[in-house]
Image (cartoon, rainbow, N blue to C red):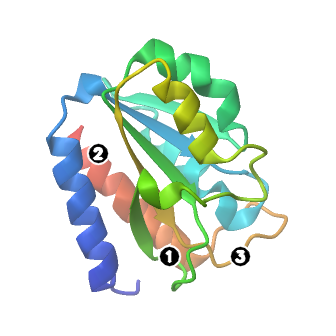
Amino acid sequence: MKQLSKYTITNLNQLSSILKSYKRSETTFLCIGNPIMSDDGIGCYIFNNLSNLNGIKLINAENVPENYVSKIIKLEPKLLIGIDAVEFSSHPGEIKLFNEEEILNYSSSTHSISLKMIIDRIREELDFSFHLVGIQPKNIILGNDFSEEVLNSANMLIRLIKSLY
């Protein structure tokens, strides 16, 4: 297994601090991705590996997060954490923690509506903090196999969340 970069470690530490500053009951994880497009499905993989935790609010939005706006509003999170494969021109498997302003131009061809539009719609009903955990994909091709780099980073993220929940 390749060692995580300082950049990824810094972002995971930031995420840990953010998660610790909210009660578990105030946090919702929105896992996004297309499960048949290799690394783009990593959000679904993370959902599947966290879904057995008690007390975690977790949504598997796959590639249609817009379909879960009402469910998110009903959960009334104070903190909403999106998890998705994000192209941010870095090394495969790199993890970046995006704040709400940084996702302004974030969009993915596998999602029909921009994440920013979805967050803005939820914000009409709720006051909450939003962060996106992006994992740099290596491959976005038809198939359900993850690249080693993306899988390693996803497993690190899963371990982090499990350690806090």
Q: CA distance from mark 3 to mark 2?
A: 27 Å
Secondary structure found at label 3:
loop
When asked about the image quadrant of residue 142, the answer is bottom right
Quadrant position of residue 110: bottom right
Residue beneath label 3, please?
139
Density class for disc 1 (Cα within 10 Å; few <14, some 14-19, many ≥20) is many
Asked whether, in this view, residue 84 is left or right of residue 165, the answer is right
Quadrant for the N terminus, please.
bottom left
Is disc 3 in contact with disc 2, using a CB cutoff of under 8 Å?
Answer: no
- Mark found first going from the N terminus, 3 or 1: 1
The disc labelled 1 sits on which kind of residue? Gly
At which x and y percent is residue 128? Answer: 34, 31
Residue 145 appearing in the image:
no
Reply above or below: 117 against 25.
Answer: below
Which image quadrant: the C terminus?
Answer: top left
Sequence-earlier tag: 3 or 2 = 3
Q: What residue appears at the point 35 percent right and 64 percent down from the top-left corner?
A: 156
User: Quick check: 135 left or right of 100?
Assistant: right
Q: SS class of the residue under badge 1?
A: loop
For mark 2, what is the residue?
A: 162
Q: Earlier in the sequence, mark 1 or mark 2?
A: 1
110 and 126: which one is in front? Answer: 126
Q: Residues within 10 Å of mark 3 (few under 14, many from 20)?
A: some
The amino acid on which the numbered mark 2 sits, given as a three-letter code, is Lys
| Foreground disc of the pair 1, 2 | 1
Q: Distance from label 1 to label 2 (Cα)?
A: 19 Å
Taking the view exactly as shown, the residue that stands out farthest to the top is: 74
What residue does disc 1 label?
93
Q: State the residue at coordinates (19%, 34%).
A: 22
| Marks 3 & 1, CB-CB < 8 Å contact | no
Mark 2 is surrounded, within 10 Å at the Cα level, by few (under 14), some (14 to 19) or many (20 or more) other residues, namely few
